[in-house]
Image: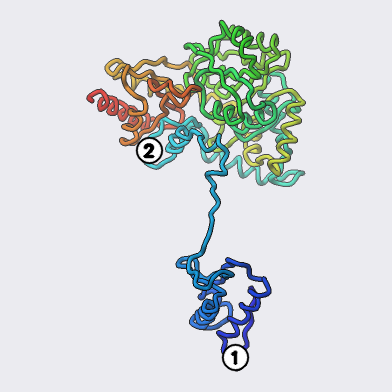
Amino acid sequence: MKLSIDKEKTVPVYLQISEQIKRQIFKGSLGDGYALPSERNLAAELGVHRNTVTKAYQDLKAEGLVFSCQGKGYRVSYVDKDQEIFQSKPVNWEGLTKDEYAVFENEFDKIYSKSFDSGIISFGGGVAGREVYPPEEAAEIFENIFKSGRDKAYFYTPFQGDPDLRKEISEFLKTKGIKADPGCIQIFSENNQSLDFILSLLLKPGDRVLMEDKTSPDVFRSFELAGAELIGVPMDEDGMICDNLETVIEKERPAFICVSASFHNPTGAVLPISRRKKLLELSYKYRIPIIEEDEGSELYYDVEPVPSIKSMDIGNNVIYMYSFSLTMMPGTGISFVVADRNVIRRFGEMLSLRVASTEWTAQMVTVNYMRSGLFHKHLEDFRKNYRHKRDLMCDEIDKFADEYGLEYRRPDGGVYLWIKLPAGLSARKLLHETQNLGMTFMPGHLFYTKKARGNDHIRLNYSYPTDKEIVEGVKILKKALAHEKSK
């Protein structure tokens, strides 16, 4: 809205203002409901007293050309001049939301977000410890990155990911028995994003998927939102039970098998090599792709690592997902997928539609850590640090586990304790009590594909909290158990 005034004219200034606004209303330049500038702002713009603008607006209001509404100021009106209330029909955003998101289960996310609240001891997260990467070292890495310069423009990487990073990852995979050239590797920011692209590309609504009957909510919720029908396969202390899996496959005809074979989240189970071979055998026989999530495989403490399913995959049936979230500097989000070259090419095409480029800084940080050898050095540091934290948490819990009927197996690696509560004790009620005392964890029902189960288990994470927080947090757990037992 453009206005001009001439203080030398004999026509009062307020009339000059109101007449110009009226002219623009009649010409259609100011539509019905148009919000006029506030009295203060227009007065400042025209260099007049605020009362002059107020008088002009009141003149227009008297003619029924504008109306005022408390808190909304003045608006153009083509309706009855007696109308004083701005009539509006707000969009029904809840009604527009897709059904699958309207009923989205977010309890896991709410508990996870408390991991970073001040004053809360969190056993609920699943992120890297803060002790391993010295700040001075990280600062030097960042300084070197920004000083080094590149032939290509800063902050840009190809859709498939930085070529140097894919080369380093290709070399890293050789240490795990996986042969994958850089052209078969796609960089993502985290495993959630990797899985989203896999399902967007390959899964059709109604497809059936075999997976462990308890797993990370991030995994099974992604499948559910993509329209999959989940078939939970029972587990024992060694992971997915494969004895009668062929019968299930012949009956259900699944489109995928999804498995976390090494230090499974939440149970910490490690799938024996015999079961890994069985899954691969079934994949080849029935032409079923396997999605293997393997981010915990480096975190072995008391056992030798078991070869990944991908390392035995001569038929190229396995889509391999790996994340550095537990072994790289906190906040450096890098994940990657190894798959058939045609699948990787399609990922690049999809990324070109969704993002301008893949994240640059985190990729450069990862390249520098891997190339310098610091990443492999810190892997040993992580194992030492996490082993210590595992033992500290277990030793503290063992002091009262028998008294309160807690059952668990000390894991050989990974970052979680999966604890069975005594009969009759609800994980939900226990969580409510510990949160009131300043500690949070994940109740077991959140990990079951069938939501009615798991209220007799809890998952505790020991990678993120400090030693002091572990000791204090376990004390809170004991206090909450005593409170529930006394009821």
Which color mode does the image show? rainbow
In-image side of 359 versus 216 (left or right):
right
In-image side of 269 versus 354 (left or right):
left
Residue type pointed to by label 2: Ile
Which residue is tagged 2? 120
Q: Where is residue 314 in the image (x, y as percent from the top left)?
A: 72, 13
Which residue is tagged 1? 11
Q: How far apart are marks 2 and 1 (CA)?
A: 68 Å
Q: Which of 78 and 328 is in front in this view?
A: 78
Residue type pointed to by label 1: Val
Give the residue displayed 47% in from the left and 19% down from the top: 267
Q: Where is residue 373 in the image (x, y as percent from the top left)?
A: 62, 29
Q: Nearer the viewer, residue 130 or 320?
A: 320
* Quadrant position of residue 480: top left
Q: Where is residue 319 in the image (x, y as percent from the top left)?
A: 67, 22
* Quadrant position of residue 163: top right
